[in-house]
């Protein structure tokens, strides 16, 4: 059997060997294994020092103060803390000011956000549907390339808007939203601006000092760090507008209680440090490999790039080169992937893989059911070699050409 070619980096990345080495040093009696909240002995102090060093490494990557970072179990928890924290605080504050208060708190988001954003917003809508103060969400629709514009956000803002939550890079089509432009629109408003940066952290430059972003969700396992480790950036000036979701000990400035996983946090810090060093080189390599793959596939019958792609090679700043969502007419994606067990691909986001429904992201940018069901996501990363791209392109072309006669053309 041929060696597996892994092309699902948008779902998760393998841990960098340097990350694994750092993590291993925090697990055994001989290493720095202690509870970082244990202030009565040296092992606890040493663990705390490593946790704070990792906080500095992540802070340097996104250009913020270390005290503005709250450790979480991943971007999903960070998204939940940001959205639920802001909404629940707004409702609690209004009730405290006037126990008889009625009305709504308003959130602006989009229909192609990650499920960690969409599902929590919908849950809040349901939870408060029969209460005096309800939660209302305006769901913005993307253009055909999968982008949300600043003008759409401007038009959606209301007097009772408390939060705008828009992702940076879409996890299915790779489209890049102009976060700076959206931040300029939200900035003068009283609403807070939350960005899910799970797919952009360590890949695109992020400066919290330059951007008017109030809350930013981060994940370690998308940047060659460990699963189960994430962070929420909380701008110092807005911390008081966030209610915690987890109680018990008052860790992380009272916003996220629980014993910190030293080894995972240290791994996240090392992954952040490495990302800062290789960000520019990584992107240049991915752009070259994306072009190589596009050139190999573009001649196949029915080949189409879904969203995100302004042109071959990409319009600067509009698409992340590591994510390529394509289809070959209406050739069924599941059948295509089953015919290539030696290549790890995806038919959509890993967060939605349990569902048999076609991708909600692809449907939102205009694809019909058959087109969405025919689409595959190819995502490449730091460990992808030119040889991997060459072999994958050849295999996909071979299988598509073999299956093509049984598929309807478009």
Image: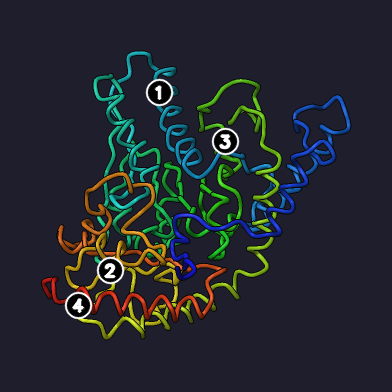
Q: Position of residue 181 (x, y in %)?
A: 42, 62
Residue occupying image coordinates x 22% and y 56%: 364
From this view, report whether residue 358 is shown above or below residue 391: above
Q: Give the number of the disc on residue 94.
A: 1
- Measured as percent of width and height from the top left, residue 385 is found at 54, 76
- Of the numbered discs 1 and 4, the one sitting upstream in the chain is 1
Horizontal and vertical percent for residue 85? 47, 32
Q: Quadrant of the C terminus?
A: bottom left
The residue under the point 30% across, 35% down is: 122
- Which of 383 and 315 lies nearest the eye of the viewer? 383
Q: Secondary structure at mark 1?
A: helix
User: What distance separates the C-alpha of mark 1 from that of mark 4?
Assistant: 55 Å
Q: SS for tag 2? A: loop
For marks 2 and 3, give the CA distance: 39 Å
Residue density around tag 1, few if under 14, some if 14–19, many if 20 or more, within 10 Å:
some
The residue identified by callout 3 is: 239
Q: Secondary structure at mark 4?
A: loop
* Residue 392: quarter of image: bottom left
Residue projecting furthest to the front: 1
């Amino acid at each position: 059997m041929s060696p597996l070619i892994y092309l699902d980096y948008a779902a998760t990345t393998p841990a960098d060997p340097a990350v694994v080495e750092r993590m291993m040093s925090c697990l055994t009696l001989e290493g720095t294994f202690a509870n970082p909240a244990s202030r009565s002995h040296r092992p606890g102090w040493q663990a705390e020092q490593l946790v704070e060093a990792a906080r500095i490494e992540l802070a340097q990557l996104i250009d913020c103060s270390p005290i503005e970072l709250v450790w979480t179990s991943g971007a999903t928890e960070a998204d939940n803390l940001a959205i639920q924290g802001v909404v629940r605080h707004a409702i609690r504050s209004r009730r405290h000011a006037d126990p008889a208060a009625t009305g709504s708190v308003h959130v602006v988001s989009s229909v192609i956000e990650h499920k960690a954003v969409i599902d929590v917003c919908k849950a809040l809508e349901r939870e408060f549907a029969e209460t005096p103060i309800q939660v209302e969400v305006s769901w913005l629709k993307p253009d055909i390339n999968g982008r949300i514009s600043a003008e759409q956000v401007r038009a959606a803002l209301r007097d009772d808007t408390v939060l705008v939550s828009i992702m940076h890079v879409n996890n299915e089509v790779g489209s890049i939203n102009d976060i700076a432009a959206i931040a300029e629109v939200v900035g003068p408003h009283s609403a807070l601006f939350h960005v899910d940066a799970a797919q952009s952290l360590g890949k695109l430059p992020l400066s919290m000092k330059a951007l008017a972003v109030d809350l930013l969700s981060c994940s370690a396992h998308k940047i060659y760090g460990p699963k189960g480790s994430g962070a929420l950036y909380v701008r110092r000036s807005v911390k008081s507008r966030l209610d915690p979701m987890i109680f018990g000990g008052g860790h992380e400035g009272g916003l996220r209680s629980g014993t910190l996983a030293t080894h995972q946090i240290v791994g996240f810090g090392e992954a952040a440090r490495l990302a800062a060093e290789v960000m520019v080189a990584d992107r240049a390599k991915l752009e070259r490999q994306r072009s190589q793959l596009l050139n190999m596939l573009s001649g196949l019958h029915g080949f189409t790039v879904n969203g995100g792609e302004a042109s071959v090679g990409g319009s600067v700043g509009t698409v992340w080169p590591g994510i390529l969502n394509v289809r070959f007419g209406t050739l069924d994606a599941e059948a295509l992937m089953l015919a290539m067990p030696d290549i790890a691909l995806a038919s959509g986001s890993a967060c939605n893989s349990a569902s048999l429904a076609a991708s909600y992201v692809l449907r939102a940018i205009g694809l019909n059911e058959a087109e969405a069901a025919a689409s595959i996501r190819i995502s490449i990363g730091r460990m992808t070699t030119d040889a991997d791209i060459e072999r994958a392109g050849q295999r996909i072309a071979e299988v598509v050409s073999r299956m093509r006669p049984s598929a309807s053309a478009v």
